[in-house]
Every structure is written in structure tokens, then in C-alpha cells.
Amino acid sequence: HVAVLDFGSQYTQLIVRRVRELGYFAKLYATEDFPNIGKPGAIILSGGPRSTSELDAPDIDFEALKGFGVPVLGVCYGMQLLNIKFGGSVASSNRREYGPAALTTVTDEALYEGVSQNSQVWMSHSDTVKILPDCAKVIATNQHGTPVSLKWGNSFYGIQFHPEVTHSHQGIRILHNFLLQCGELAPFHIEDFKRELIENIRTTVGSKQVVCGVSGGVDSTVLAVLLNEAGVNVRAIFVDQGLMRKNEGDEVRNNFHRMGVEIETVDASERFLTALSGVDDPEKKRKIIGELFVDVFWDAVGNAEMLAQGTLYPDVIESASNAKSKASKIKTHHNRVDRILELQEQGKVLEPLAELFKDEVRALGTSLGIPQDILMRHPFPGPGLAVRCPGIITEDRLEIIRECDAIFISRLKEYGWYDKVWQAYAGLVPVKTVGVKGDERSYEWAITLRAVVSEDAMTADWVELPSALLRETSNRILNEVKGVNRVLYDISTKPPASIEWE
Ligand code: XMP
């Protein structure tokens, strides 16, 4: 495998991801665990936020590193550290170089095979290498002639830029070139990954009881099935907050039943709707739902010994950056509230999917035998229909949304569009307008339909659905759903709009 040592860069996981994309098995290790990293065929030292000149800067045993006898690639901090280890030095600087640079001189070294001159690379560092040891050779420089890539001896490589981010246009190629220097490397198979996850879960959990919340969504489903497969003592709890779509509770129960996992349902719809009664501020609604969810969930849990969460890698990055940036607190995501953080500090939270991206979770789900229709379900937000019901939430309004949504989703499936969009739904526009129904004047609600495509939910574009599909959906809603006399189609991109209405 390829061992990636984490020196703390926000991109470290991305290195693992890229190596896996290239078809090799990669694993992430904390520097504290070094040299217990198994028998790697290659080692990558990640970047990191610290400076090698700091007294307690992250370090590793160089003799042990050499002892592995395999090619090593140091990225950013990793390169600086290697340069020091080989007897060179690093100049610390207060100025940060952040952004694009051009690889102006690349040598014919294998690392740069097929990489063009002036290829854009992405920089994010403050320190730079200063004195080069005798065994070092500069194998690439930037447009100012500054060395940005070194080779020490025959099998130690260093790059100052970040090959793992897409802004480094040929970064993947450079990583691949490095891996090609490493002889036979173990291929990445999700099956192996699954086996390893299951082993880890067994070791971590032992005979303790683990609880997990299930929502019917892909991540929590894969998590529950994985725990079940690991044979640990697991309780899967489904909280019905009364904000689910039509028949959703039954479908979730049936789905789990099909997969041999029995779930416990807590029907808390009355508690939620009562708490939400009369509230129309979006942030207040989210807060109420988030807090009540935690209360209801913990009431049901009792004093379980461990909690498992279906956190994915993008959630990890997002909450890390949330902590740093005020701007990202646009909406409160409710799976990271204080009580969970407390548990996390006590080491009682298990997040087995935290290294995975969505498509890898789906692949894992497939290898666990989870049916495709479940794995291909659209994402559904934790606060449920509340975020699709601007203004106050009433059972009547939710019922209207449920009926319209069911019609829209069934039409999308009928026309073969469900799998082509990232997410689609019907929401209520809390405005009554005038229309005619039969011979009479009507004064009823408007419904909005939204269908978007997206890579990662950070940005999204609305979908040009066929007019026949929209027409049929609209006709059916206007004929079948009481209380609605107008159907709108949402043609807003994100940004500036968001995918949900609240
Ligand atoms: P927005 O509306 O922010 O949504 O563009 C982006 C994605 O996140 C989902 N979403 C949530 N998911 N809890 C969740 O688990 C939430 O509070 C939440 N809010 C939005 C939304 O459905 C979309 O996929």
C-alpha cells in the first residue's frame, strides 16, 4: 500500500483520495504512529500548517523512514522536512505564497514525464528550502527560478506545490509518475477497504453497544449495514420528526428489513410540530429541530456506550473550515451539536466513513449488498420538509408538500430523470394567489418544483427538465392536490440561491 503520513494539511485526505483514484490502496497515518505503518510500497509525507523551525514541529524518525527502503515523496512541509533531514536547511518566512505558479523548468526526471513546461501548480506555503545538501538535485523550478521540486539520492522526491488539488493541472500525473517509480503496489479494492473497516470496527467496539441514527439516507444506511455486517452489538434508531416525505417512514423500515437490519422507530412528530408551531424564522426552526432531535435521540439511546455517525470526508473538511470561517455559518448543520462534540472528546464517537467520499460510500454499499435504488437515493436534509416550507409549518402545509413531492418524484422516475439529477423536490411557497377552479374563484397556495445538478452540493445548477414532464407534473398537482392553484419551477443557481429554500 501507499502510506500517507499526515502532517496536518487540509489537503492530506485528498492525497489519499487521489492515490485511490489512480487505483492504488492508500492509507493515512498520524505521524505519532510512525513507524508503525505496516509494509508500505511507497510513502508520502503530506503538507502541514506548521513551520519546520518551530520547536515542537511534527517530526518523524528519519532512520526508520530510510529503513523502509521504498520511494518517498514529500509534499510542501514534507519536502522541507526531507531537505532538513538530508542536511539542508529551510528559511522560515512570514509571507505566504498562496495560489497558482508555473512550472517553468522541469527536468526529464521520471517524476515529470509528460508534464508540460509552464504547467500550472498550486502553492500554499510560507517556508521554503534554502540550503540544498550535496545529494539534492533541483528537478523543477517556478517562473522565478525558485526550486519547487527536489530529488535526494535515487528515491526521495520533494515537491513544494500541492499535486493533489485540481488547481495543479497536471498534479495527478505527477503523483502517478511517482507511484510508477514504486514497483508493484497493492491495488485499491473497496472489498479490502471494507474488510479493514470491519476489523477496525470490531477492535474499537469490542463488546460495547453502539447506537446509530438512521434516516434512510445513503450514509447512515451504509453505516448501519456495515456495523451489522461487523457483527457488533448495534441499535439503529430512526427518529420520525414528522417532517418526512410521503410514506417515507414505512419505506425506510421496509428497506432495512430487506437488508436484514431491524430498526427502532421513535415517532416524535407531535413533539416536533408542537415545538415548531408558529415559528417562521429559518434559523430558529433549524435550531429547534436540531436540539429536539438530539434530545429525542438521546432519550431513546439511554446510556449507550458508543455512538456511530455516518460522517463523510467532505463533512470533515466542511466542519473544519466552519470552525475557521464566519462566512460559512450560513446555515447551522445539525449533526455537529455540542453534545456530540463532547462525546467525541471522550472518544465515544465512531465515524467509520470519515475517510470516504460519496461515490466510495456507494461502492462500499454495493459491496455490502445494499440495493441500488437505496444507494442512488437523492440526499434529503436532516431538518426534512421544514426547509422546504418557508414561513410557519403546519400539518396541512406539510401534507400539501408531501402530495406534490410524491407526484413530482414519480414523474421524474417515469421519465427517466430521477438518476440524472442530484436532488429534486416540491416545496411550498407560502403565498396565496387567485385562480379559477371549475367556475369558481380560488385563493390557494403556490408550489415550487426544484431539480438541480451538482457535484458536491457546494454549487448547483437548475435542470432543464423536458416540458412534457413539467406539464404532466403540474397538471397532476393542480388536479389532485387540494389547496394548490399554482405551480412554479425554480430556475435559480447556487450561488446565490441555495438548494433548499431555507
Ligand atoms: P443548501 O440548501 O445549503 O443545501 O444549498 C446543500 C445540501 O445540503 C442539504 N442540507 C442539509 N443536510 N442537514 C443535512 O443533513 C441540514 O441541515 C441540511 N441543510 C441542507 C441539502 O439538501 C443539499 O443537499
Image (cartoon, rainbow, N blue to C red):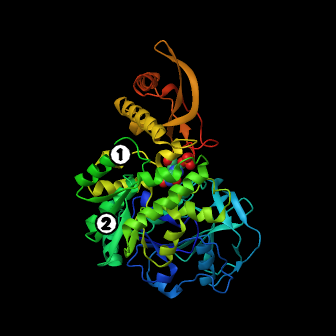
Task: Quadrant for residue 88, please give it.
Answer: bottom right
* Nearer to me, 1 or 472: 472
Mark 1 crowd level (few <14, some 14–19, many ≥20, 10 Å Cα): some
Left or right: where 502 falls relative to 383: right
Q: Tell me which amino acid carries mark 1.
A: Glu
Residue at the (41%, 46%) spot, across then down: 244
Number of numbered discs: 2
In what element is the residue under mark 1? helix
* Nearer to me, 49 or 143: 49
Examine the rendering and report whether any part of residue 287 can be seen: yes
Position above or below: 430 against 8: above
Location of residue 89 in the rendering, given as x and y in whole percent from the top left corner: 68, 81
Quadrant for the C terminus, please. top right
* Mark identifier at residue 51: none
For the residues marked 2 and 1, what is the alpha-carbon distance in whole angstroms? Answer: 20 Å
Left or right: where 366 falls relative to 272: left
Q: Do the numbered discs 2 and 1 sit on residues whose CB atoms are within 8 Å?
A: no
Q: Which residue is mark 2?
A: 235
Q: Which residue is mark 1?
A: 248
Examine the rendering and report whether any part of residue 309 can be seen: no
Q: Tell me which amino acid carries mark 2.
A: Arg
